[in-house]
Amino acid sequence: MGWRSVMISRPARLRREHYSLAIDQEETAFVPFEDIAVIVLDHREITLTHPVLSACAEYGISLYATGSNHQPAGVFLPFLSHSRATRMMRKQLGITRPMVKRLWADIVRRKIENQAACLTLCGKKGVERLETCAQRVRSGDPNNLEGQAAAIYFAELYGANFYREDKTRWTNAALNYGYAVLRGAIARGLVAHGFHPSIGLFHDSEQNAFNLADDLIEPFRPLVDLYVAQCPAPKEAELMPKDKQALVALLNVDVGMPQGKMSALSAVEYAVESLARTFESGHVELDLPRLIGLQAHRLEY
């Protein structure tokens, strides 16, 4: 499984040379395709060849393109590469409502627990209120404790005047960018395990091709929130290249999983695998991440 995140924010030509991505700029850099998990294209003067797209599909690489606002606008994913994609799609369509409600409760509970951990790591108030919300989550979250917790969480983390839809704030631009990167990584994992990303659990918009990714991203969001909260926010809303590089690099930050400490990207794979087991067995057994900080994962050889 790939682990590198490649971000290109200057004019470049991308081509395939044997088993590596060749990045032609002032000099040529080579990155083995098997090491790459994510490629982000963030400049209008980047060109790439058809063999590069084929390699991304072959190696399961998520290729992001940004729009005029430099936010991720699209992602290239392998086309249902799993050998049992049709079988999994039938299971997605046939899942029972009680199982959906139990899965959603587990996701919401862990999301709120991670929000509480984020407040703790930032030395903010409101931790006990969020922990109480997490304990009260029931099947399907009928009392919308997710929404109640969010109102407490964002006010404590970013201040009482914080407004999530304010496009003039750097904080929101950074959150949007980080969430988009996570969303694409999760969609990549879902496709690799035979899921169709548009068939969600709680999210079910007919206009959303990533409903299931938007379900599974919820416990991962506080990782982005933590990074943004610990960065001094500049007055300008525009993200600098270093900001984007740091947000993409969050995929390599350690989180806690039942299998042990691992990168967020690896945790996505385990979470998706556990979702697949749930669909196969009919028993809810989700493995979801716990927020433990912003320590980058160390590779051991």
Image (cartoon, rainbow, N blue to C red):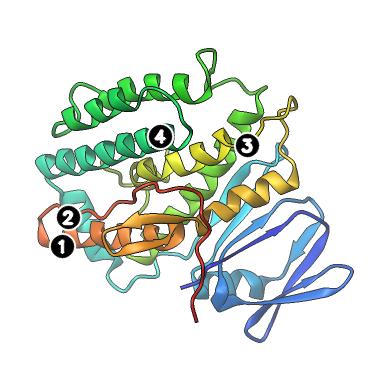
Q: What's the amino acid at mark 4?
A: Thr
The residue that mark 1 highlights is 280
Distance from disc 3 to disc 2, alpha carbons, whole Å, reads: 35 Å
Q: Are marks 2 and 1 in contact (CB under 8 Å)?
A: no
Q: Of circles 2 and 4, which is in front?
A: 4
Q: What's the amino acid at mark 3?
A: Cys
The residue that mark 3 highlights is 231
In the picture provided, is 292 more to the left or to the right than 39?
A: left
Q: Which sits earlier in the primary sequence, circle 3 or circle 4?
A: 4
| Residue 112 spot, x, y in % from top left | 31, 34
Q: Which sits earlier in the primary sequence, circle 2 or circle 1?
A: 1
Distance from disc 3 to disc 4, alpha carbons, whole Å, reads: 16 Å
Q: Residue furthest front?
A: 123
Q: Secondary structure at mark 3?
A: loop
Q: Secondary structure at mark 2?
A: loop
- Looking at the image, which is closer to me, 115 or 9? 115
The residue that mark 2 highlights is 285
